[in-house]
Amino acid sequence: MAMFQTMRLPVAPLDTAADGTDVRPLLQLSGGSMAHFELRSGAVSKAVTHRTVEEIWYFLGGRGEMWRKQGDHEEIVPVEASVSVTTPRGTQFQFRSFGDEPLTFVLITMPPWPGPDEVYEVPGKWVPTVG
C-alpha cells in the first residue's frame, strides 16, 4: 500500500525538460506522475514526442498556442488559464508563450515519467527559441 505524500511547489525549477521548459517535479504514484512547467514569455519550446507515456495538461497562467500532430491529423489550439489538453501516446507537440507573463501548467504523465530517454525531438511547427 502506498503511503500518503504531501509537498509544496518548489520555489525554483529543479530541472529543464527536453522541450526546453523549466520543470518542478511534484508527486508520483504507481499509475502516474505530476509536474509543474513554465515557458518564459515570448519563448517557443522544442517540438517533441514521447515513446511510452501520455499526458493530461492543465494551464494555470499566461497565454500561448499548442501544436499537436498524430499521423495526418494536426491542430493548433490557443492555451491560457483554465484550458486542459491531452497528448496521447505518440503525439508530436510544441507550444509557445505570448504576452507579458510565462505560460505555466501542470501535467499528469501516465505511466509515471520513466526518465530522459522517454522523449525525443521531432520537426515542429515553429522555430524553437529555448535550449
Image (cartoon, helix red, strand yellow):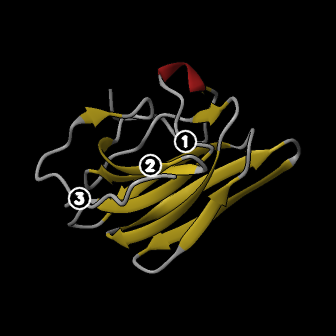
Mark 1: few, some, or many residues within 10 Å (few <14, many ≥20)?
some
Point out residue 38 in the picture as x, y percentages from the top left corner: 30, 52
Q: Amino acid at mark 1?
A: Pro
**Front position in the image: 107 or 85:** 107
Mark 3: few, some, or many residues within 10 Å (few <14, many ≥20)?
few
Mark 2 or mark 1, earlier in chain? 2
Q: Residue at x 75, y 38 (%)?
A: 90
Secondary structure, mark 1, is loop
Point out residue 121 in the picture as x, y percentages from the top left corner: 57, 25
Secondary structure, mark 2, is strand
Quadrant location, the C terminus:
top left
The circle on residue 7 is 3
**Front position in the image: 76 or 106:** 106
Q: Amino acid at mark 3?
A: Met
The circle on residue 28 is 2
Mark 3 or mark 2, earlier in chain? 3
Point out residue 70 in the picture as x, y percentages from the top left corner: 80, 45
- On screen, 17 above or below 56? above
Check contact, mark 2 vs mark 1: CB within 8 A. yes
Q: Residue at x 43, y 40 (%)?
A: 45
The circle on residue 51 is none
**Front position in the image: 126 or 115:** 115
